[in-house]
Image (cartoon, rainbow, N blue to C red):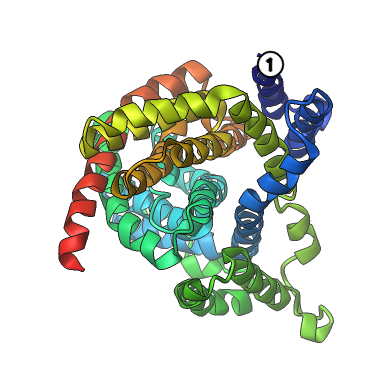
Amino acid sequence: MLAFAIFVATLALVIWQPRGLGIGWSALAGAGVALLTGVVHWTDIATVWQIVWDATFTFVALIIISLVLDEAGFFSWAALHVARWGKGCGHRLFFLILALGAAMSAFFANDGAALLLTPIMIAILARLDFPTRTTLAFLIATGFVADTTSLPLIISNLVNIVSANYFQISFGHYALVMAPVNLVSLAATLIVLWLMFRRHIPTRYPIAGLQDPASAIRDHGVFRAAFPLLAILLLAYFATAPFGVPVSLVTGAAALLLTALAGRWWRAGRGAVIPVAATLRHAPWQIVLFSIGMYLVVYGLGKAGLTDAGAHALQWLARQGDLIATIGAGFLAALIASVMNNLPSTLLGALAIEQAHLPAGTQELMVYANVIGNDLGPKLTPIGSLATLLWLHVLARKGYRISWGQYMKIGLLITPPVLLATLVALVGWKQVLPVLN
């Protein structure tokens, strides 16, 4: 009960962040209380840090890459192209925007997709003179697709990185399993979102007011380097995986290279367009403090008995066959993530899977089901992920307020069918893979 009370208080601090405390210091405060009360011990810090350090620094590096590209006008350029490709058809535009969100989520993580694309889409939709209800439909759909399609690569979600590192899944093997499954998640998301918002999507929209995409580019040097750099980065993930090179090292090298290019370091800053120092200050450095603090609190909760309970539940599910085991593990992870936040929920799920001592095939299915549940499940509630809370904050600052009740109504309608379709696809694809190999 003490461990649970500390967790609840820490989560409350993280959500509300009194007096600008920030998510990092809020989580560290909870970790401090857990250490002082003996819920966790000093030796646990090294254990938890070993689990989360690679994921944490990978996430920071990805956000730095995203912020630099955003300052260069890369995402605005892409969004304006998408708006023109719609050719005045509202329904085509809807699907194209969701496809753009899915692509951004795959390469720049779900947080980057939701937080960077949202203000860009607000600006473009305002130029198209869409009514508020239509704009909200597009924005909500964008926010949801960022999470539901954050499965394909290890770097697509912090959850993926933690899970892959914990169970030593290579970049290539992870992509082989989850990239096809992500396509099913994308298709299910498109269908469900279109059924929900089709009445709010205009049949036609004017494209005359859209600016030329080229005019959105602010740093041509960074823009020209973007596509080659991203292609090399993706290849580097696959090439270095067999040698055990940390994902954060590869991503960090790309972030450093792009930052040097943006800052024109070889010219001592002369000719730089992007304010690199200000951009780096906006990187989510507090996520480093959050990772060690929140995960330490949850590690203590797991030691207090929650991991045992989860392991027993997974053992029972495993006896019901692969399909039920996968669906059950995925929905269990989703429910826990929706009330606990998906980052600590991922750690608990991983600990429980390891402790359950399941057959190898069932364990692998549950590992991926835990990822799917923690990627998609947070959309059930606003507190399911920090990205959602930040996304709602961005919308509120732009004048678009979504209450928690409205959000949960949408989340409860959208998430379960997409989650179910994705988990079933996982089981089916895992049965096909041995035949292909």
Image location (x, y in percent) of residue 123: 53, 47
330 to 4, vertically: above or below: below
Query: Could you classify mark 1 by the number of other residues whose Cα lies within 10 Å: few (under 14), some (14-19), or many (20 or more)?
Result: few
- Give the quadrant of residue 269: bottom right
Q: Residue at x 23, y 39 (%)?
A: 322
- Give the quadrant of residue 3: top right
What residue sits right under mark 1 in the picture?
5
Image location (x, y in percent) of residue 270: 81, 81
105 to 13, vertically: above or below: below
Q: Give the structural element (helix, strand or loop) at label 1.
A: helix
Is 21 left or right of 168, judged from the image as shown?
Answer: right
Residue placed most toward the observer, 139 or 331: 331
Image location (x, y in percent) of residue 313: 39, 25
Instruction: Report whether residue 90 is seen.
Output: no
Q: Residue furthest bottom?
A: 266
For the N terminus, give its image quadrant. top right
Image location (x, y in percent) of residue 350: 49, 41
Q: Residue at x 26, y 47 (%)?
A: 426
